[in-house]
Image: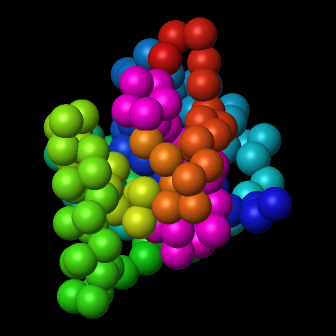
Amino acid sequence: MTNTVLVDSGFTIALFDPHDPLHDSAKKTLSNLNARLRTVWPVIVETSFFLGPKGKSSFLRWIERGAVTVRAIEITDIDALISILNRYADQRIDLADACLIWLAGQEKTHRVLTTDRRDFSVYRAPDGRPFERVWLTDEA
């Protein structure tokens, strides 16, 4: 089993917004997690949209320090993304989630840090496995 965990925006928003009700849970989860963290640029954009200036700066410094690896999406990956978007069109999938599904295939993992119970219960990794939502709390 791979020791790589994908990072979704719900987690990073909670981690870098001290007023988020899941902030303490996100910090605790991160401190107890022994895994390589991976994400994509659309998750960074989505997270940044919801954070204030201080949160954005802290979040970007966290990335800069190498806490999470950001995988680039190349032009040659567009067909795969379109296929994912089409497969989950009835779920109104957003680009960040489609990119995480794509990344699951690249990283050979199905583990994700997310608050998104509904969508990640429906989505499947490219190998067909259901996603394992690593971070779930009673509040989420």
- Above or below for 9 versus 99: above
**Span highlighted in magenta in the image:** 103-122
Q: Is residue 88 left or right of residue 25?
A: left
The quadrant of the picture occupied by the N terminus is: bottom right
As for residue 139 lying within the magenta part, the answer is no
Colouring scheme, one of rainbow, by chain, secondary structure, one colour: rainbow
Residue 18 visible, this angle: no
Q: Residue at x 75, y 47 (%)?
A: 33
- Above or below for 139 versus 59: above
As for residue 112 lying within the magenta part, the answer is yes
Residue 123 visible, this angle: yes
Observer-nearest residue: 23 or 91? 91
Observer-nearest residue: 69 or 3? 3
Residue 7 position in % (x across, y down) = 50, 52
Q: Residue at x 22, y 88 (%)?
A: 75
State which quadrant residue 119 falls in: top left
